[in-house]
């Protein structure tokens, strides 16, 4: 009997801890009931930070260096993103106007629909971060996937931070011109590229750690969903920039030679792909 039960215990424990991740994300992202957009903005950043804190405590207790390093990076990522969005929302009238035009304020959204959005977001945040949990609970050793994951994740956080900082400073000096300096010479949406790299790093770190179909499904669904959302965000930004700068020859030249999201890949436009959302 003991031999039969041994494999079940780790899986059951991992399931319960994944539910805890979901619960933490649901608790923090509930701020979206106050303002609908916060489900996917402040609720996103601070949910990831809270999950990172939970995983940090678990990693310290298990003395697991790789999950610990990645959990700390989650805290850095989430606090930076949440803090940046909070400051931008408070200080930028243009940003608030953009959010009102592009994202529903939720004022006419029925409570059951809000609840579905809330729980869906919380589940996404748990799935995105789950590879770190799986590496921790499955007691995976330090290997090439773990090291590569940390490097790619860290690179993504640095790139996203640099992109936000660059655009913020550039727009202060040139409020009516598109940003094409610094990392914006690499791709037109370097902040979204940073986001993709961050979560690709998390996913890569779990490739040699995940066990069982449900772990692979959870982690893969989280990664694919956030990549899809980032491409959707790039599409939304492209449409807005085409509207604002489409008659500017400088912008047309910039857009024709600078990839929209992935460096060195000649994909310059995603505006026609209506199946993308973000």
Image: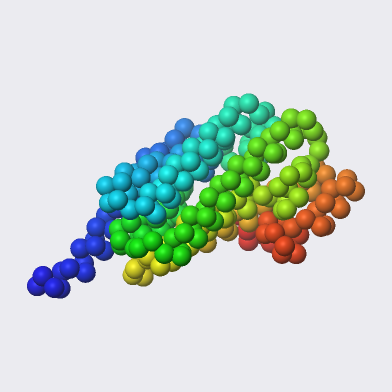
Residue 273 appears in view = yes
Compared with 29, 13 (above or below) is: below
- Give the color scheme: rainbow, by chain, secondary structure or one colour: rainbow
Residue at horizontal 63 percent and vertical 26 percent from the top: 91
Judged from this view, the residue extending furthest toward the top is 91
Residue at horizontal 15 percent and vertical 73 percent from the top: 4
Where's residue 19, x and y in %?
A: 31, 52
Residue 217 appears in view = no
Nearer to us in this view, 68 or 251: 68
Left or right, residue 15 beside residue 75: left
Left or right, residue 95 beside residue 266: left
Nearer to us in this view, 128 or 197: 197
Left or right, residue 244 beside residue 21: right
Where's residue 164, x and y in %?
A: 64, 40
Nearer to us in this view, 145 or 137: 145
Q: Tell me the quarter of the image containing the N terminus.
A: bottom left
Where's residue 217, x and y in %?
A: 41, 66
Compared with 14, 119 (above or below) is: above
User: How many dots with numbers?
Assistant: 0
Residue at horizontal 57 percent and vertical 55 percent from the top: 197
Judged from this view, the residue extending furthest toward the right is 249
Left or right, residue 261 beside residue 70: right
Where's residue 175, x and y in %?
A: 77, 32
| Quarter of the rendering containing residue 262 | bottom right
Residue at horizontal 21 percent and vertical 69 percent from the top: 7
């Amino acid at each position: 009997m003991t031999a039969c039960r041994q494999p079940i215990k780790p899986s059951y424990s991992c399931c319960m801890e994944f539910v805890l991740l979901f619960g933490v994300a649901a608790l923090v992202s509930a701020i979206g009931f106050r303002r609908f957009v916060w489900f996917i903005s402040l609720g996103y950043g601070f949910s990831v930070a809270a999950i990172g804190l939970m995983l940090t405590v678990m990693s310290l207790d298990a003395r697991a260096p790789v999950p610990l390093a990645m959990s700390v990076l989650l805290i850095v990522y989430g606090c930076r993103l949440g803090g940046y969005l909070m400051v931008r929302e408070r200080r930028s009238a243009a940003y608030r106007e953009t959010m009102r035009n592009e994202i529903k304020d939720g004022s006419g959204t029925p409570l059951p629909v809000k609840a579905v959005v809330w729980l869906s977001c919380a589940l996404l945040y748990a799935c995105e971060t789950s590879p770190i949990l799986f590496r921790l609970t499955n007691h995976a050793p330090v290997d090439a996937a773990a090291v590569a994951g940390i490097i790619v994740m860290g690179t993504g956080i640095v790139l996203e931070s640099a992109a936000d900082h660059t655009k913020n400073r550039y727009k202060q000096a040139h409020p009516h011109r598109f940003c094409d300096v610094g990392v914006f010479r690499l791709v037109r949406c370097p902040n979204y590229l940073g986001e993709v790299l961050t979560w690709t790093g998390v996913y890569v770190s779990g490739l040699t750690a995940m066990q069982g179909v449900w772990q692979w499904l959870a982690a893969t669904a989280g990664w694919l969903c956030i990549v899809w959302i980032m491409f959707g965000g790039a599409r939304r930004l492209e449409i807005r920039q085409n509207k604002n700068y489409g008659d500017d020859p400088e912008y047309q030249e910039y857009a024709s030679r600078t990839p929209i999201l992935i460096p060195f890949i000649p994909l310059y436009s995603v505006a026609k792909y209506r199946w993308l959302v973000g």
